[in-house]
Amino acid sequence: MDLILKYFPELTSQQIKHFEQLMLILPRLNERVNVISRKDIAYLEERHILHSLSIAKLLRFDSNARVLDVGTGGGFPGIPLALMFPEASFTLVDSIRKKISLVSEIVEELNLKNVTPVNQRMEQLNLKADFVVSRAVTAFPKLHLWTQKLIEPGSGQSMPNGLISLKGGDLNKELMPFKQQVEV
């Protein structure tokens, strides 16, 4: 919890409690459904929660924002962002039933009213969101193709609606076709 508080000292006592609970719940559930590698679970706070929260360092979701997390896996970045922005609405989507079942358990144990888990392929989704977030899902051109129909343009948010993707590695080739549209 020290790292989260180092970068987000403004957290409320309720948010701190939720993050502490998440760091207890996820390792336990991960033993049954392996959504984070056994070696990496020891770095849950730094590599998964804090990494997901990096979005919150760059932008703030308005209280009426609709955020769609595609390929959520174990709930990243959606659950940490939902804890950070409890007034926004989050839909977490994954095509793998056991992953969404795990996410549903986390949502239930944390009593998160602003999160809806959905077991479906993102290409088959028929809903609109202000923002689509993802974390290491697929190559950006494919992700853009699958998600552009899900983003509702100009829905009154304080920042432009769009796709926010956390990715690593050399993205130059992936982002080349989007040079005019992408902010890195």
Image (cartoon, rainbow, N blue to C red):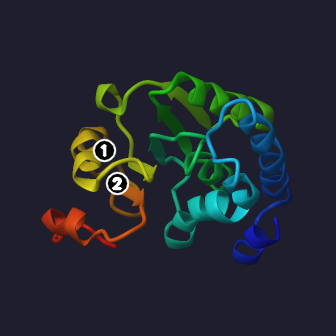
Q: Is 50 in front, or is 86? A: 50
Q: Is residue 180 above or below residue 144?
A: below
Q: Secondary structure at mark 1?
A: loop
Q: Is residue 125 left or right of residue 92?
A: left
Mark 2, residue position: 163
x then y, percent, for residue 177: 13, 63
* Placement of the C terminus among the 4 image quadrants: bottom left
Question: Three-letter amino acid code at disc 1?
Answer: Ile
**Residue sitting at x 56%, y 72%:** 57
Query: CA–CA distance between discs 1 and 2?
Result: 8 Å
Q: Looking at the image, can residue 72 be seen? A: yes
Residue 123 position by quadrant? top left
Q: Looking at the image, can residue 10 be seen? A: no
x then y, percent, for residue 9: 77, 74
x then y, percent, for residue 87: 62, 48
**Residue sitting at x 69%, y 54%:** 39
Q: Residues within 10 Å of mark 2 (few under 14, many from 20)?
A: many
Q: Secondary structure at mark 2?
A: strand
Residue at the far front in the pictured view: 39
Q: Is residue 155 above or below residue 114?
A: below
Residue 38: mark in rendering: none
The reply to whether dot 1 and dot 2 touch (C-beta < 8 Å) is yes
**Residue sitting at x 42%, y 66%:** 168
Q: Is residue 62 above or below residue 75?
A: below
Residue 105 position by quadrant? top right
Question: Three-letter amino acid code at disc 2?
Answer: Leu
Mark 1, residue position: 151
Q: Is residue 158 left or right of residue 88?
A: left
